[in-house]
Image (cartoon, rainbow, N blue to C red):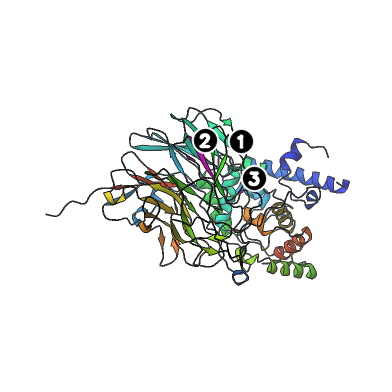
């Protein structure tokens, strides 16, 4: 058939099944979401929480509902960033970039004179995230890596296409990437398992890698990682601490999400056979006695279906001393659970080698346990130079600033 | 492609573009622009064009935003949504979510209908799309939808060629033969 411009433009409009007889099936995707759903839960109506894809003005954000420890205050810092996820800042913090998932945008926030303005600097991408590294902005989508050079004063011009050098695998499910620039000048990139629970289809998934900035020197530094959505380097040891989501469809109790510590490259964190603190997978490791052998167990579990996202070790001086070196972790909140869990920011206090971890709620009130409703989904954290802490809210496309002022002493 | 089908397809294309051209003359965020193809009451009379009356608000919002962003939908819809604001999209979604889906075609192939019903039960379609298949939140209404549209969309999902669609649907339809989509489509399209 001769392809005219007209028929090309309309090809996707026409839903004539006769077309499909000529289309070849692509390789089949691994069953992702309801795979691993046991017969007993087959009729469960639990489904992922839909994201909000339209702008929310500040006047419609119930920031007053946030509850914080005494002396802390939350305010709306920026709005209009639909689907806001990970934040990355330039050296003087006058520019911030914020990636998204479904809506395909990367935003640039200009922070000047106490005001924020937001614009879209990259769009039409499949689940893009961004990281500022070495004066450039790197944008990682599922199928693309773009580098915007000389980005410190704002992104402009065409990016350099780095896709080939990074050789990303094709699956989308669990493959949105949190990317971090290390003090070793390498980019740290996670590759989730493209399913709920499965043997990964290739050896390219369920791991964390690092690359040189030009995409060379790729190393797999952690394996058995189901779906890490955030990491930070420990301020004293420099070790990588990362969050990881537990599998679904094993009931309300878990297996719980994890906070892990990579003490040396090459450690295995258990997926798909061993979850949380040693739960053997009933589907893939049934009767397997050594499912947890040589598996590095988490520093702490982080709650059932909590959806642990960004982690940030606090290094500022604005917050009281007891927060020094403490990890702040955003829990976006559950879907695969009959009552909601998470929807908060917690702190994790542990020794430098990850012993004696204690999880304490810090920012709550995004969710109302009384009627199982929620309004916000805290996703990522960033620290400003004054020591205040920014929290991105993926649901309402906003960023909140949390600051501290010591309560006046009573006489 | 057989000649008859090719001609039929050309005629359809032409019709579609006349409608689209009419729609373009309207303001993008105006329901009148949608009416040209999707029907004034949100019930489509055009093969391949879905009915949108009674679709869940979140589903409509997400579809419209993703399409405007160029990540979902088709060129006609992308063109129509160019420059349409979030506010206008929310208003459209509210409008169409409140319209009543028209009563489905009464001509039922009982054998195909029942087969479709069995397949829907086996594949737990109702766990997301609801028992009455009216949809909820980000999950579309299937009841009363155009039959040929449903069959084609399911096939597109299974073949990973539905841009911007939820990858969960690709997985949910994994391994289901095309003949089963036709039965499912017949069943859903005949539900109120």
Q: Is residue A74 visible?
A: yes
Residue A401 coordinates in the image, percent (x, y) = 35, 46
Q: Secondary structure at mark 1?
A: helix
Q: Which tag, 1 or 3, sits closer to the chain's start?
A: 1
- Dominant secondary structure of the residues highlighted in magenta in the image: loop
Residue B171 coordinates in the image, percent (x, y) = 66, 56
Output the chain of dot 1: A
Q: Is residue B30 visible?
A: no
Residue that extends furthest to the bottom in the rendered view of this protein: A40
Reading the image, the residue beneath label 2 is A138
The numbered disc on residue A170 is 3
Output the chain of dot 3: A
For disc 3, the neighbor class at 10 Å (few under 14, some 14 to 19, many from 20) is few
Instruction: Tell me: A29 left or right of A183.
Output: right
Q: Quadrant of the C terminus of chain B?
A: bottom right
Residue A55 coordinates in the image, percent (x, y) = 47, 47
The numbered disc on residue B178 is none
Give B170 or A31, whichever is nearer the viewer. A31
Q: Measuring 40% from the left and 51% from the top, which residue is drawn there?
A: A353
In reply to whether residue B74 is colored magenta, the answer given is no
Same chain shared by disc 2 and disc 1: yes
Do residues under tags 1 and 3 come within 8 Å of each other at their CB atoms? no
Q: Secondary structure at mark 2?
A: strand
For disc 2, the neighbor class at 10 Å (few under 14, some 14 to 19, many from 20) is many
Q: Which residues are magenta?
A: A172-198
Q: What separation in Å lies between label 1 and label 3 (alpha carbons)? A: 12 Å
In reply to whether residue A184 is colored magenta, the answer given is yes
Q: What separation in Å lies between label 3 and label 2 (alpha carbons)? A: 19 Å
Reading the image, the residue beneath label 1 is A163
């Amino acid at each position: 058939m001769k392809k005219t411009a007209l028929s090309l433009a309309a090809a996707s409009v026409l839903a004539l099944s006769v077309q499909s007889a000529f289309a070849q099936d692509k390789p089949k995707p691994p069953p992702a979401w309801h795979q691993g759903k046991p017969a007993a839960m087959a009729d469960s109506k639990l489904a992922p929480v839909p994201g909000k894809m339209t702008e929310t003005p500040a006047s419609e954000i119930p920031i007053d509902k946030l509850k914080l420890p005494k002396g802390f205050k939350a305010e709306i810092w920026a709005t209009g960033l639909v689907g806001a996820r990970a934040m990355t800042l330039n050296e003087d913090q006058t520019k911030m970039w914020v990636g998204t998932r479904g809506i395909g945008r990367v935003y640039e926030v200009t922070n000047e004179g106490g005001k924020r303005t937001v614009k879209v600097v990259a769009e039409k991408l499949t689940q893009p995230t961004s990281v500022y590294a070495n004066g450039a902005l790197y944008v990682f989508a599922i199928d693309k890596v773009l580098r915007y050079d000389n980005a410190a004063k704002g992104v402009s011009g065409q990016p350099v296409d780095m896709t080939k050098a990074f050789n990303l695998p094709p699956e989308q499910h669990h493959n949105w990437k949190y990317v971090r620039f290390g003090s070793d000048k390498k980019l740290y990139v996670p590759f989730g398992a493209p399913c709920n629970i499965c043997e990964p289809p290739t050896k390219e998934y369920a791991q964390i890698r690092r690359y040189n900035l030009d995409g060379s020197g790729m190393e797999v530094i952690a394996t058995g990682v189901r779906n890490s959505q955030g990491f930070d380097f420990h301020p004293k040891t420099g070790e990588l601490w990362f969050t990881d989501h537990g599998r679904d469809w094993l009931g309300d109790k878990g297996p719980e999400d994890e906070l892990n510590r990579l003490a040396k490259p090459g450690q295995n964190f258990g997926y798909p056979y061993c979850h949380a603190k040693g739960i053997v997978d009933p589907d893939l490791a049934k009767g397997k006695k050594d499912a947890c052998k040589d598996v590095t167990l988490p520093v702490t579990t982080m709650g059932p279906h909590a959806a642990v996202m960004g982690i940030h070790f606090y290094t500022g001086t604005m917050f009281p001393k007891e927060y020094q070196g403490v990890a702040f972790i955003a829990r976006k909140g559950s879907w695969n659970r009959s009552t909601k869990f998470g929807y908060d920011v917690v702190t994790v206090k542990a020794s430098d080698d990850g012993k004696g971890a204690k999880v304490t709620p810090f920012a709550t009130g995004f969710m109302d346990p009384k009627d199982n409703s929620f309004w916000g989904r805290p996703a990522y954290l960033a620290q400003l130079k004054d020591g205040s802490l920014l929290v991105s809210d993926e649901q309402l496309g906003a960023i909140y600033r949390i600051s501290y002022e010591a309560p006046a002493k009573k006489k | 492609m057989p000649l008859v089908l090719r001609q039929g397809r050309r005629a359809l294309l032409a019709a579609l573009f006349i409608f689209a051209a009419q729609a373009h003359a309207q303001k993008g965020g105006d329901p009148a622009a949608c009416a040209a193809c999707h029907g004034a009451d949100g019930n489509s009379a055009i093969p391949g064009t879905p009915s949108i009356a009674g679709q869940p608000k979140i589903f409509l919002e997400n579809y419209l935003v993703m399409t405007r962003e160029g990540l979902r939908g088709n060129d006609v819809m992308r063109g129509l949504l160019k420059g349409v604001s979030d506010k206008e999209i929310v208003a459209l979604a509210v409008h169409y979510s409140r319209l009543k889906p028209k009563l489905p075609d009464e001509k039922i192939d009982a054998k195909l209908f029942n087969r479709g019903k069995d397949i829907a039960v086996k594949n737990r379609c109702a766990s997301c799309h609801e028992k009455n298949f009216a949809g909820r939140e980000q999950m579309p209404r299937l009841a009363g939808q155009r039959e040929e549209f449903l069959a084609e969309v399911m096939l597109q999902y299974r073949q990973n060629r539905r841009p911007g669609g939820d990858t969960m649907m690709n997985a949910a339809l994994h391994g289901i033969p095309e003949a089963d989509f036709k039965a499912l489509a017949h069943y859903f399209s005949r539900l109120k």
